[in-house]
Amino acid sequence: MTATAAVAGVFAERAARARELAGRYAYASEPLRLAGALFEAQASAFERAQADRPSPDELVPYIVRVGLPAVMEATMAEGTEVLREAALLAFHDGDLDGIVAAWLGGGDLRPTDRYLARAASAPILEALPNAASTMRHGESDDRHCPVCGGPPQLAIHTDTGESLVTGERRLQCSRCMTEWRFARLTCASCGDTGGANTPILSDPQRLPHVRVDACDRCRRYLLTIEMPKEPRAVAVVDEIVGLPLDLIAAERGYTKIAPNVMGF
Protein backbone atom coordinates (compact mmCIF):
# COMPACT_ATOMS: atom_id res chain seq x y z
CA MET A 1 0.00 0.00 0.00
CA THR A 2 1.33 3.46 -0.87
CA ALA A 3 1.60 6.21 1.72
CA THR A 4 -1.14 8.16 -0.05
CA ALA A 5 -3.46 5.16 -0.02
CA ALA A 6 -2.74 4.60 3.67
CA VAL A 7 -3.64 8.21 4.45
CA ALA A 8 -6.84 7.97 2.44
CA GLY A 9 -7.66 4.82 4.39
CA VAL A 10 -7.24 6.51 7.78
CA PHE A 11 -9.54 9.38 6.93
CA ALA A 12 -12.01 7.08 5.15
CA GLU A 13 -12.10 4.90 8.26
CA ARG A 14 -12.90 7.90 10.44
CA ALA A 15 -15.62 9.08 8.06
CA ALA A 16 -17.16 5.62 7.76
CA ARG A 17 -17.21 5.17 11.52
CA ALA A 18 -18.90 8.56 11.92
CA ARG A 19 -21.62 7.57 9.46
CA GLU A 20 -22.10 4.20 11.17
CA LEU A 21 -22.45 5.72 14.63
CA ALA A 22 -24.77 8.45 13.32
CA GLY A 23 -27.21 5.69 12.46
CA ARG A 24 -26.91 4.09 15.91
CA TYR A 25 -26.94 7.11 18.21
CA ALA A 26 -29.75 9.50 17.30
CA TYR A 27 -28.74 12.06 19.95
CA ALA A 28 -25.33 12.47 18.27
CA SER A 29 -26.39 12.10 14.63
CA GLU A 30 -25.92 15.77 13.71
CA PRO A 31 -22.36 16.19 15.03
CA LEU A 32 -21.41 12.76 13.67
CA ARG A 33 -22.63 13.60 10.17
CA LEU A 34 -20.66 16.83 10.31
CA ALA A 35 -17.61 14.95 11.61
CA GLY A 36 -17.88 12.51 8.71
CA ALA A 37 -17.93 15.34 6.20
CA LEU A 38 -14.98 17.00 7.93
CA PHE A 39 -12.88 13.83 7.83
CA GLU A 40 -13.51 13.49 4.12
CA ALA A 41 -12.55 17.13 3.57
CA GLN A 42 -9.48 16.86 5.79
CA ALA A 43 -8.03 13.97 3.78
CA SER A 44 -7.22 16.24 0.82
CA ALA A 45 -5.70 18.90 3.10
CA PHE A 46 -3.50 16.24 4.72
CA GLU A 47 -2.27 14.98 1.36
CA ARG A 48 -1.57 18.49 0.05
CA ALA A 49 0.35 19.43 3.18
CA GLN A 50 2.53 16.33 2.88
CA ALA A 51 3.26 17.22 -0.72
CA ASP A 52 3.77 20.98 -0.24
CA ARG A 53 5.67 20.90 3.08
CA PRO A 54 5.07 24.57 3.99
CA SER A 55 7.61 26.09 6.35
CA PRO A 56 6.56 27.03 9.91
CA ASP A 57 6.54 30.70 8.86
CA GLU A 58 4.02 29.89 6.13
CA LEU A 59 1.83 27.66 8.28
CA VAL A 60 -0.92 30.12 9.22
CA PRO A 61 -1.67 31.44 5.69
CA TYR A 62 -1.29 27.89 4.36
CA ILE A 63 -3.96 26.59 6.75
CA VAL A 64 -6.27 29.44 5.76
CA ARG A 65 -5.68 28.82 2.06
CA VAL A 66 -5.68 25.00 2.00
CA GLY A 67 -7.49 23.78 5.10
CA LEU A 68 -10.25 26.29 5.64
CA PRO A 69 -12.15 26.14 2.30
CA ALA A 70 -12.69 22.40 2.65
CA VAL A 71 -13.93 22.88 6.22
CA MET A 72 -16.38 25.49 5.02
CA GLU A 73 -17.66 23.17 2.30
CA ALA A 74 -18.24 20.38 4.83
CA THR A 75 -19.90 22.80 7.24
CA MET A 76 -22.26 24.11 4.58
CA ALA A 77 -23.20 20.53 3.68
CA GLU A 78 -23.71 19.03 7.15
CA GLY A 79 -23.61 21.79 9.77
CA THR A 80 -26.65 23.05 11.61
CA GLU A 81 -28.29 26.24 10.39
CA VAL A 82 -26.86 28.17 13.33
CA LEU A 83 -23.34 26.89 12.64
CA ARG A 84 -23.61 27.57 8.90
CA GLU A 85 -24.64 31.17 9.48
CA ALA A 86 -21.94 31.79 12.09
CA ALA A 87 -19.27 30.13 9.94
CA LEU A 88 -20.20 32.21 6.90
CA LEU A 89 -20.02 35.39 8.94
CA ALA A 90 -16.61 34.46 10.35
CA PHE A 91 -15.31 33.37 6.94
CA HIS A 92 -16.32 36.56 5.17
CA ASP A 93 -15.86 39.15 7.91
CA GLY A 94 -13.40 37.62 10.36
CA ASP A 95 -9.63 37.88 10.60
CA LEU A 96 -8.93 34.35 9.39
CA ASP A 97 -5.17 34.52 9.80
CA GLY A 98 -5.66 35.91 13.28
CA ILE A 99 -8.14 33.18 14.22
CA VAL A 100 -5.82 30.40 13.08
CA ALA A 101 -2.79 32.00 14.72
CA ALA A 102 -4.71 32.33 17.98
CA TRP A 103 -5.74 28.67 17.89
CA LEU A 104 -2.19 27.52 17.19
CA GLY A 105 -0.97 29.76 20.00
CA GLY A 106 -3.41 28.36 22.54
CA GLY A 107 -5.50 31.54 22.69
CA ASP A 108 -9.12 31.82 23.75
CA LEU A 109 -11.55 32.01 20.83
CA ARG A 110 -15.26 32.26 20.30
CA PRO A 111 -16.83 28.82 19.66
CA THR A 112 -17.28 29.24 15.90
CA ASP A 113 -13.81 30.69 15.40
CA ARG A 114 -12.33 27.85 17.46
CA TYR A 115 -14.24 25.27 15.42
CA LEU A 116 -13.06 26.69 12.09
CA ALA A 117 -9.44 27.11 13.15
CA ARG A 118 -9.21 23.70 14.75
CA ALA A 119 -10.89 21.78 11.93
CA ALA A 120 -8.74 23.53 9.33
CA SER A 121 -5.48 23.13 11.27
CA ALA A 122 -5.83 19.54 12.46
CA PRO A 123 -5.06 17.61 9.25
CA ILE A 124 -2.14 19.89 8.40
CA LEU A 125 -0.58 19.56 11.85
CA GLU A 126 -1.17 15.81 11.66
CA ALA A 127 0.60 15.72 8.30
CA LEU A 128 3.52 17.89 9.40
CA PRO A 129 4.77 16.86 12.86
CA ASN A 130 7.93 18.95 12.41
CA ALA A 131 5.81 22.05 11.83
CA ALA A 132 3.51 21.07 14.69
CA SER A 133 6.53 20.92 17.00
CA THR A 134 7.13 24.64 16.45
CA MET A 135 3.75 25.30 18.10
CA ARG A 136 4.98 24.23 21.54
CA HIS A 137 4.45 26.72 24.38
CA GLY A 138 6.84 25.40 26.98
CA GLU A 139 4.76 22.40 28.11
CA SER A 140 7.22 19.54 28.45
CA ASP A 141 5.55 17.21 30.94
CA ASP A 142 3.98 13.89 29.99
CA ARG A 143 0.48 15.35 30.28
CA HIS A 144 1.01 17.30 27.07
CA CYS A 145 1.65 16.14 23.53
CA PRO A 146 5.34 15.33 22.97
CA VAL A 147 5.12 16.82 19.48
CA CYS A 148 3.12 20.07 19.71
CA GLY A 149 2.58 20.50 23.46
CA GLY A 150 -1.19 20.41 23.13
CA PRO A 151 -3.51 19.00 25.84
CA PRO A 152 -5.03 15.54 25.43
CA GLN A 153 -8.43 15.18 23.80
CA LEU A 154 -9.08 11.66 25.04
CA ALA A 155 -7.52 8.50 26.39
CA ILE A 156 -7.39 5.07 24.79
CA HIS A 157 -7.07 1.71 26.48
CA THR A 158 -5.47 -0.41 23.79
CA ASP A 159 -6.40 -3.97 22.93
CA THR A 160 -3.59 -6.53 23.01
CA GLY A 161 -5.76 -9.26 21.56
CA GLU A 162 -4.92 -11.50 24.53
CA SER A 163 -7.36 -11.86 27.41
CA LEU A 164 -4.64 -12.13 30.08
CA VAL A 165 -2.53 -9.23 28.84
CA THR A 166 -3.58 -5.69 29.73
CA GLY A 167 -3.15 -3.06 27.06
CA GLU A 168 -1.48 0.28 27.65
CA ARG A 169 -3.13 3.62 28.24
CA ARG A 170 -2.50 6.23 25.57
CA LEU A 171 -3.48 9.88 25.28
CA GLN A 172 -4.39 11.51 21.97
CA CYS A 173 -3.55 15.15 21.28
CA SER A 174 -6.39 17.60 20.72
CA ARG A 175 -4.34 19.53 18.14
CA CYS A 176 -2.19 17.19 16.03
CA MET A 177 -3.64 13.72 16.82
CA THR A 178 -0.34 12.36 18.14
CA GLU A 179 -0.71 9.49 20.60
CA TRP A 180 1.61 8.83 23.52
CA ARG A 181 1.81 6.41 26.43
CA PHE A 182 0.56 7.58 29.79
CA ALA A 183 0.38 5.94 33.22
CA ARG A 184 -2.85 4.36 34.37
CA LEU A 185 -4.63 5.77 37.44
CA THR A 186 -2.98 9.14 36.84
CA CYS A 187 -4.89 12.35 36.11
CA ALA A 188 -4.10 13.56 32.61
CA SER A 189 -4.63 17.15 33.76
CA CYS A 190 -2.82 17.59 37.07
CA GLY A 191 -0.86 14.36 37.35
CA ASP A 192 -2.43 13.21 40.62
CA THR A 193 -1.79 9.52 41.23
CA GLY A 194 -4.21 8.92 44.07
CA GLY A 195 -6.70 6.31 42.93
CA ALA A 196 -9.31 7.59 45.36
CA ASN A 197 -9.19 10.98 43.61
CA THR A 198 -9.94 9.60 40.14
CA PRO A 199 -13.61 8.51 39.95
CA ILE A 200 -14.90 6.75 36.85
CA LEU A 201 -18.30 7.66 35.38
CA SER A 202 -19.90 5.30 32.87
CA ASP A 203 -23.12 4.12 31.24
CA PRO A 204 -22.54 0.39 30.61
CA GLN A 205 -25.90 -0.11 28.90
CA ARG A 206 -25.67 2.61 26.25
CA LEU A 207 -21.91 3.16 26.03
CA PRO A 208 -20.06 0.09 27.28
CA HIS A 209 -16.75 1.10 25.66
CA VAL A 210 -16.72 4.79 26.67
CA ARG A 211 -16.17 6.17 30.15
CA VAL A 212 -15.20 9.34 32.00
CA ASP A 213 -11.92 9.45 33.91
CA ALA A 214 -12.34 12.37 36.30
CA CYS A 215 -10.18 13.94 38.99
CA ASP A 216 -11.45 15.25 42.31
CA ARG A 217 -8.25 17.18 42.88
CA CYS A 218 -8.33 19.46 39.82
CA ARG A 219 -11.99 18.81 38.80
CA ARG A 220 -11.02 18.00 35.22
CA TYR A 221 -11.85 14.94 33.12
CA LEU A 222 -11.50 13.29 29.75
CA LEU A 223 -13.25 10.45 27.98
CA THR A 224 -11.57 7.08 27.64
CA ILE A 225 -12.25 4.71 24.73
CA GLU A 226 -11.84 1.09 25.81
CA MET A 227 -10.76 -0.77 22.69
CA PRO A 228 -11.00 -4.28 24.22
CA LYS A 229 -14.75 -3.70 24.58
CA GLU A 230 -15.16 -2.35 21.03
CA PRO A 231 -12.23 -3.26 18.74
CA ARG A 232 -13.86 -1.44 15.81
CA ALA A 233 -13.90 1.87 17.66
CA VAL A 234 -12.14 4.87 16.13
CA ALA A 235 -11.27 6.90 19.19
CA VAL A 236 -11.64 10.42 17.76
CA VAL A 237 -15.08 9.45 16.42
CA ASP A 238 -16.37 7.34 19.29
CA GLU A 239 -15.50 10.15 21.68
CA ILE A 240 -18.33 12.15 20.10
CA VAL A 241 -20.98 9.63 21.17
CA GLY A 242 -19.83 10.13 24.75
CA LEU A 243 -21.97 13.28 24.96
CA PRO A 244 -24.27 11.85 27.69
CA LEU A 245 -21.19 11.22 29.82
CA ASP A 246 -19.96 14.76 29.14
CA LEU A 247 -23.29 16.02 30.49
CA ILE A 248 -23.07 13.83 33.58
CA ALA A 249 -19.52 15.03 34.26
CA ALA A 250 -20.57 18.66 33.85
CA GLU A 251 -23.50 18.17 36.22
CA ARG A 252 -21.05 16.89 38.83
CA GLY A 253 -18.82 19.92 38.46
CA TYR A 254 -16.03 18.55 36.27
CA THR A 255 -14.57 20.41 33.28
CA LYS A 256 -13.24 18.63 30.22
CA ILE A 257 -9.50 19.00 29.65
CA ALA A 258 -10.11 19.82 25.98
CA PRO A 259 -13.53 20.04 24.31
CA ASN A 260 -13.69 18.15 21.02
CA VAL A 261 -13.96 19.85 17.64
CA MET A 262 -17.75 19.88 18.02
CA GLY A 263 -17.40 22.00 21.15
CA PHE A 264 -18.30 19.50 23.88
Image (spheres, rainbow, N blue to C red):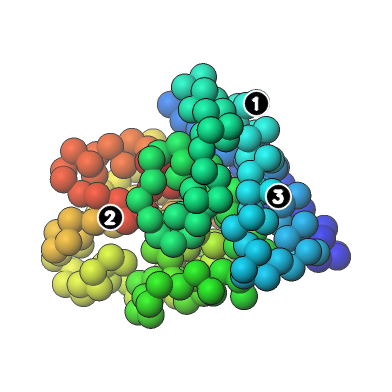
Q: Position of residue 174 (x, y in %)?
A: 46, 58
- Residue nearest the viewer, comparing 157 with 55: 55
Q: Position of residue 222 (x, y in %)?
A: 33, 55
Instruction: Give the CA separation, mark 1 to mark 3.
Output: 18 Å
Residue 21 visible in the picture: no
- Residue nearest the viewer, comparing 70 with 166: 70
Q: Residue at left 31%, top 67%?
A: 188
Identity, as a three-letter code, of the amino acid under mark 3:
Val
Which quarter of the figure has residue 126?
bottom right
Neighbor class of circle 1 (other Cα within 10 Å; few <14, some 14-19, many 20+) is: some
Tag 2 secondary structure: strand
User: Residue tagged by mark 2?
Assistant: 221
User: Residue tagged by mark 1?
Assistant: 77
Say which of marks 1 and 3 sits in front: 3
Residue 186 visible in the picture: yes
Instruction: Give the CA separation, mark 3 to mark 2.
Output: 33 Å
Above or below residue 21? Residue 173 is below
Q: Residue at left 48%, top 27%?
A: 86
Which labelled disc corresponds to residue 3?
none
Left or right, residue 211 beside residue 29: left
Q: Earlier in the sequence, mark 1 or mark 3?
A: 3
Q: For the N terminus, which image quadrant? A: bottom right
Say which of marks 1 and 2 sits in front: 1
Tag 3 secondary structure: helix
Evaluate if marks 1 and 3 touch, with contact meaning CB atoms under 8 Å apart. no
Instruction: Give the CA separation, mark 1 to mark 2.
Output: 32 Å
Left or right, residue 98 beside residue 33: left
Identity, as a three-letter code, of the amino acid under mark 1:
Ala
Which labelled disc corresponds to residue 66?
3
Say which of marks 3 and 2 sits in front: 3
Neighbor class of circle 2 (other Cα within 10 Å; few <14, some 14-19, many 20+) is: many
Above or below residue 199? Residue 262 is above
